[in-house]
Amino acid sequence: IGDWSSDVCSSDLVDEVEKRNRLKLILPWLEAKIAAGQQEPAIYNAMAKIYIDSNNNPEQFLKENNVYDPLVVGKYCEKRDPYLAYIAYAKGFCDDELILITNDNQMFKHQARYLVRRRRLELWAQVLSSDNTHKRQLIDQVRSFYALLPSASTDSVTAGCRHRRARVDRPRGRFGDGQGVPVDRKSTRLNSS
């Protein structure tokens, strides 16, 4: 492969080898490309897939590498290991895919962490909507995660809850499911607002 591979498009070669389920055959070529400083996502996508299939520290690779395409690798991981799909989707801020994979695999703890860290009100509105059948499980995980957060980090949860409360057609002070979220007002600095 090394003699003629400079004439071949990396993504085309990777696609053809992957169709035949033989990615490991080009591992030395992929490693040589990376060592030569190649930054083509197709090369890193292939490396991620090899690490995932061989269980060779895939979590570390997905967290530390910034070149692979999170959508491609996340999709590849969905059936193999949903947690690895979650890592890839979280890294690439693939919000809709992350919500789907965490809902489908009941990974509400991970979804709650992502939502708190992401701090996007439209995501909170999406997951707390009345048509979300997983809302109850997510709220339970947000509550438990919320209780463990340092007070400086609770502002994002509080903001999300306030935004959602304002949009819900229920009495003020409710979390959308008819139950309030336990809030330590001293640590969240709600008294001053």
Image (tube, grey):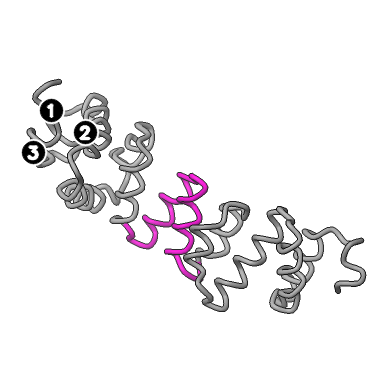
Horizontal and vertical percent position of residue 43: 71, 61
Residue at the disc numbered 2 = 158
Specify the label residue 190 is tagged with. 1
Residue at the disc numbered 3 = 184
Decide if residue 63 is on the left or right side of residue 128: right
Identify which amino acid the numbered label 1 is placed on.
Answer: Leu
Residue range highlighted in magenta: 79-107
Within the image, what quadrant is residue 2 found in? bottom right
- What secondary structure prevails in the magenta region? helix
In-front residue for pair 22/189 = 189
Horizontal and vertical percent position of residue 39: 71, 53
Identify which amino acid the numbered label 3 is placed on.
Answer: Asp
The crowd level at tag 3 (other Cα within 10 Å; few <14, some 14-19, many 20+) is: few
Q: Looking at the image, is 39 positioned above or below residue 6?
A: above
Q: Which callout, 1 or 2, points at the residue further toward the start of the chain?
A: 2
In-front residue for pair 8/165 = 8
In-front residue for pair 142/175 = 142
Tell me how far mark 1 sits from mark 2, CA to CA.
8 Å
Tell me how far mark 3 sits from mark 2, CA to CA.
11 Å
